[in-house]
Amino acid sequence: MKKLIALTSLTLLASSAMAIENSKTVCTHDAETRVIEVVYSGEAAVPCEVQYTKSTGTQTLWNAQNAEGYCEEKAQAFVEKQQGWGWDCQTAATDNGQTDEELIQNAESAATEQEPVAASE
């Protein structure tokens, strides 16, 4: 029994030491760029917030203090809405060494590399 408690304690300590990485989705359409980001203020899935950035500034659309997965669900639904409006969106973890500018450039490059779809007659 003592071994089980010790093992459980070590597992909890190891998992709490791992920080959750923010996720950022960069959406482009023509010359415009939008960024949808899930930001964690600690090492756990909550508290979190969904930030939306466009040329006029950044605003927090949603936040959660207790409900794990809430921010991720809201962000994903908003990304899907953007894609439905014709935006091309690319998602990456923000802690992967890329700067915001590199993420935006990669998203813009991916959008321009896509071949146009031929119209059917």
Image (spheres, rainbow, N blue to C red):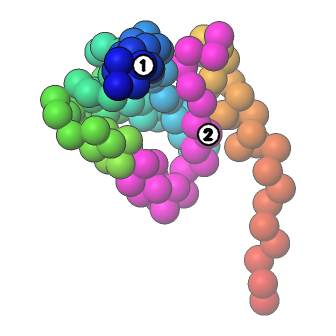
| Closer to us: 112 or 100 | 100
| Closer to us: 36 or 23 | 23
Residue 90 has which mark?
Answer: 2
Residue that extends furthest to the left in the rendered view of this protein: 65
Q: Residue at x 60, y 30 (%)?
A: 92
- Horizontal placement of 89 versus 53: left or right? right
Looking at the rendered structure, the kind of residue marked 2 is: Gln
Q: Residue at x 71, y 43 (%)?
A: 111
Question: How far across and down, in percent of the image, does residue 86 sit?
Answer: 54, 57
Looking at the rendered structure, the kind of residue marked 1 is: Lys
The segment highlighted magenta reads 76-97
Closer to the chain start, of discs 1 and 2, is 1
Residue that extends furthest to the bottom in the rendered view of this protein: 121
- Horizontal placement of 18 versus 69: left or right? right
85 w.r.t. 105: above or below: below
Numbered disc total: 2
Question: How far across and down, in percent of the image, does residue 53 sit?
Answer: 38, 28
92 w.r.t. 13: above or below: below
Query: For mark 1, what is the residue?
Result: 3
- Horizontal placement of 60 versus 79: left or right? left
